[in-house]
Image (cartoon, rainbow, N blue to C red):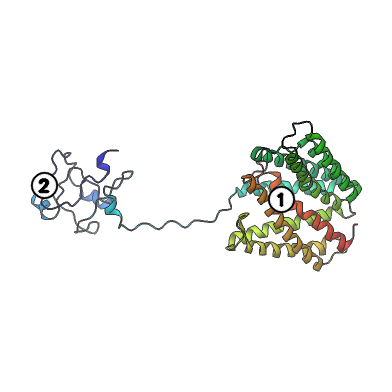
Amino acid sequence: MNDSSWGAPQAGYWGPPDQGPVQGAVPAGPPYDAHHAQQTRPMPIVPGAPEHGGDQEMDQGVARPSGPLFRDEPTRARPHPGEMPQNPESMSDAPQPAPPPQKKSAGRNLGAAIGVGVGLGALVAVSLFVVKAVFVGVVAVAIVVGLRELTKRLEERKGIKAPFVPLAVGGAAMIVAGYVWGADGAWTAMALTALAVLVWRMAQPPENYLRDVTAGVFAAFYVPFLATFVSMMLAADDGPWRVLTFIVITVVADTGAYAVGWRFGTHKLAPRISPGKTREGLLGAVAFAMVAGALCMQFLIDGGTWWQGLLLGLAVSVSATLGDLGESMIKRDLGIKDMGTLLPGHGGIMDRLDSLLPTAPVVWLLLVVFVGSG
């Protein structure tokens, strides 16, 4: 950067009256064009022009334009585009343009998120109402992928090596056992999976054994065991409608929390865990979920009534929010934003299961209390 960029006098600078022209100045440019001056603004800087203003210009035969585009009083020179100001201090009092208002951003690719959401919804609907066993397979695959995401993030960020193979096999077995044998089958598969994790880890050195198996048992409970309540809902005579009610109310609660929180949210709900969640968003989740619950219980569940749906929606909004905060706590501890990148606009499978997993036992229990096990 040359010295002329930092306050060296340029054309249009009004120096002291007793200073003469600078020696060695660049010859003056083409003569002044009045028509061109009327079409451009601001007036271009003419290199080499005398540095004195006032009557001295008239004495030297330099014409000063006048008219609506020019002011008679001296003005500061404007730098060319891309140049630094000639005198930063002299420009400090100039009015600064107000920053443009920033729009709220969703933080994700909404187009991709909507497309993926519609695709997942279609897959669930087709598998759910065509053959129940197909939906059980879809849940088992989702659980295995979610376990893979969780164990990989634990190893990458914390060095925790939770055994994936026994978790994947045991997790899929839990889903099938819950559908075939109910709660007894789910608990038995959970116990056997925990035992398999303990034994599998023995093939490695004993260092960090307790840490790794603890993480493995936690992963087995957090992902596949909670998902077994979905397969137990499916086993009822009206199982597809129960599962659909569970999914619809949970998704509506998430949507209500997002829509209301994004538009009206000002008071943080849990800033240390998830700064984006607000109390207004929680109220939106409660309102949306209660309406959805009343409609689902009234029209989808045999023997259900609207007031039961209100209670169901209230419980789902709380459990879904707690589940979302729980996974946010895990991700904050790991120092990551998403568990994976499999679903564009959503993150990973675990980023979609965060509110569904803890909500499944709540919905299963309330449906059993309200209308029986089916």
In the picture as drawn, the residue positioned furthest to the bottom comes out as: 307
| Count of number-bearing discs | 2
Q: Give the quadrant of the C terminus.
A: bottom right
Residue 289, horizontal then vertical, whole percent: 73, 62
Secondary structure type for disc 1 = loop
Among numbered discs 2 and 1, the one appearing first in the sequence = 2
Q: Residues within 10 Å of mark 1 (few under 14, many from 20)?
A: many
Alpha-carbon span between mark 2 and mark 1: 77 Å
Residue at the spot x=72%, y=35% of the render? 207
Query: Which quarter of the figure has residue 192?
Result: top right
Going by the picture, which residue comes out furthest to the left? 59
In the image, which disc is placed on residue 20? 2
Inspect the image, locate mark 2, and give the three-letter code of the amino acid beneath it. Answer: Gly
Q: Is residue 19 toward the left or the right of residue 281 in the image?
A: left
Amino acid carrying mark 1 in the image? Asp
Crowding at dot 2, Cα within 10 Å, few <14 / some 14-19 / many 20+, comes out as: few
Front-most of 47 and 363? 363
Name the residue rendered at 75%, 56% in the picture. 248
Q: Which residue is tagged 1?
A: 354
Place residue 70 in its image quadrant: bottom left
Position of residue 335 in the picture relative to residue 308 (left or right): left
Disc 2, SS: loop
* Residue 7: percent from left, percent from top: 25, 46
